[in-house]
Amino acid sequence: MEKKDLDWAGLGFGYVQTEQRYVSNFKDGKWDEGGLTEDANIVLNECAGVLQYAQTCFEGLKAYTTEDGRIVTFRPDLNAERMFDTAKRLEMPPFPKERFVEAVKAVVKANAAYVPPYGSGATLYIRPYMFGTNPVIGVKPAAEYQFRIFTTPVGPYFKGGAKPLTLCVSDFDRAAPHGTGHIKAGLNYAMSLHPIVEAHNAGFAENMYLDAATRTKVEETGGANFLFVTKDGKVVTPKSDSILPSITRRSLMIVAKEYLGLEAEEREVYFDEVKDFAECGLCGTAAVISPVGKIVDHGKEICFPSGMDEMGPITRKLYETLTGIQMGRLDPPEGWIVEIK
């Protein structure tokens, strides 16, 4: 299929409307058969559950053009599973996992002309989401829902690309113990908007959130998990019940162990340890890995030996290996790559 005439290399991480999206509705206790539509607009009652009590959740994954010209997605079954778990936590009817994956395939296939060409540095971002649609005035779950998927071609999440970022330690809490930090609920991201605006106004790229209970342990940023590298080459990611189980982070840990032969562990990471790490990065679907060069804790700077000019050597190997798998340059573990046919 001929690609759209877009400035692929000049794309930012923004919304470009594509031609088709997937829609399915839940009513009378069941999901309808769903299907594709050209209509990008949503009409809701003024009292819709999503508008009154933020009953909404979402996912994010990507489609890529591989080196040999195939269009693929990366581990969509894990997105289906995470959205299933999120919906249960929010008292929403989970969208069936198998149907989720098939819907992703259908909407990517329908928008194949918008999947950026190999080597452009851009990808097709896929956004599944769900929300309560019927009027709800008392505080309770909605009875009707809509599940949708749209796609948009995107460039790098951070404008500087792979240039190391400067973060600040936030005075705000991202998520409470036993709260909703471990699910991809829209309300979590709404809570992060004020802190990120403050961080940007102060000249920082992102916030580092500490655990709300003790403020001694590293959690995540507003939109990505942390990944650290020790001075002896071990890969470490924070473990917590109140951070999102990033699919990219979980994949990177397997890449570290099985492709690069590195020791890798998920454990509690105390903020006092951060100054002793050799490298730091932010990982997630949107950014893959963005290197961190400096973290500022109320005026005190923590500068990583990897510096402010480029990724650290192990972070780069992790990035190149995972993107190599995604782009078809390296053989993937079984089930990681799903081809769109």
Image (cartoon, rainbow, N blue to C red):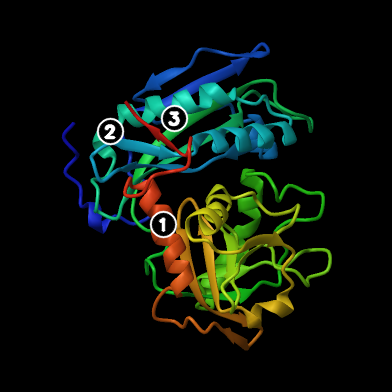
Residue 73 horizontal side relative to residue 1, left or right = right
Of the residues shown, which amino acid type is indicated by label 2? Ala
Q: Earlier in the sequence, mark 2 or mark 1?
A: 2
The answer to whether 213 is drawn above or below residue 80 in the figure is below
Rounded to the nearest angstrom, the CA distance separating label 1 from label 3 is 25 Å
Residue at the front extreme?
261
- Quadrant of image for the C terminus: top left
The answer to whether 277 is drawn above or below residue 66 in the figure is below
Taking depth in this image into account, of 264 and 278 the one nearest to the observer is 264
Rounded to the nearest angstrom, the CA distance separating label 3 from label 2 is 12 Å
Of the residues shown, which amino acid type is indicated by label 3? Val
Q: Earlier in the sequence, mark 1 or mark 3?
A: 3
User: Residue 122 location, x and y as percent?
Assistant: 31, 52
Taking depth in this image into account, of 317 and 70 the one nearest to the observer is 317
Taking depth in this image into account, of 98 and 83 the one nearest to the observer is 98
The answer to whether 31 is drawn above or below residue 137 in the figure is above
Classed neighbour count for the residue bearing mark 2: other residues with Cα under 10 Å, few (<14), some (14–19), many (≥20): many
Taking depth in this image into account, of 327 and 102 the one nearest to the observer is 327
Residue holding disc 1 = 321
Rounded to the nearest angstrom, the CA distance separating label 2 from label 1 is 25 Å
The quarter of the picture where residue 2 lies is: top left
* Residue 112 numbered tag: 2
Residue at position x 28%, y 36% in the image: 70
